[in-house]
Image (cartoon, grey):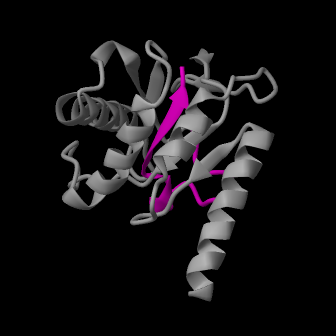
Amino acid sequence: MIAKLTVLAFAALTSFSALAQNASVHYREGQRVDPKEVAKILSAAPTKTRSIRLLDQAGAPQGQDAQGPSISLPVRFGFDSAEIVDSARPQLDALAAGIKMLPPGQTVVVEGHTDAVGSGEYNKQLSQRRAAAVKQYLVRVHGIEEERLKEVGVGEQRPIEGSDPHSPQNRRVQFRGG
């Protein structure tokens, strides 16, 4: 019981801290996602304080990264595939419930991320396919309007801060208010 309360307290503190610092809340596989927290995080206004530019293979800017707090889920896919595995669905279902709490018309950016295993171009394409698969799951299963969701493939360009770029924890899908 104490361990469960500690995990809940840590998750609440992490969520509050992320909002205060305009950062990401990173959920672990199987961790309960609270739809109210999803709505709160995704509705937070983006700021210009944490702007990051993504670079293409030649090092040229691709455009500005989305800004503001985000939610990161370790969505699992089949190997070399964009097929969502069943164990990822409960977190995506809770995320969908949170998106439905947002004001009508508010968009959500669905970012696919990979680890650094494989070529940069391959990872970019794989992350794009996976972001599109998550978008389609949210549209098909939960009835979220397709135009509210914008998918982006980031590839290996933005590993979780402080992590090894090859670490499996970088294989994730991240969600931001758009």
Pick whichever, 118 or 105, lies toward us: 105
Position of residue 64 measured from the top left corner of the image (x, y, whole percent): 63, 17
Pick whichever, 70 or 144, lies toward us: 144
Residue lying at 46% horizontally and 25% vertically, measured from the top left? 108
Position of residue 46 measured from the top left corner of the image (x, y, whole percent): 69, 23
Would residue 93 appear left or right of 152 to someone viewing this image?
A: left
Q: Is residue 158 above or below residue 13?
A: above
Among the 4 quarters of the image, the one containing residue 96:
top left
Residue lying at 26% horizontally and 61% vertically, measured from the top left? 87
> In the rendered structure, which segment of residues is drawn in magenta?
158-178
Position of residue 94 measured from the top left corner of the image (x, y, whole percent): 38, 48
For the C terminus, which image quadrant?
top right
For the N terminus, which image quadrant?
bottom right
Q: Is residue 152 above or below residue 134?
A: above
Pick whichever, 77 or 29, lies toward us: 29
Residue lying at 65% horizontally and 77% vertically, measured from the top left? 6
Q: Can residue 111 be seen in this view?
A: no
Residue lying at 72% horizontally and 41% vertically, measured from the top left? 19
Magenta region includes residue 172 = yes
Magenta region includes residue 98 = no
Q: Can residue 93 be seen in this view?
A: yes
Would residue 176 appear left or right of 127 to someone viewing this image?
A: right
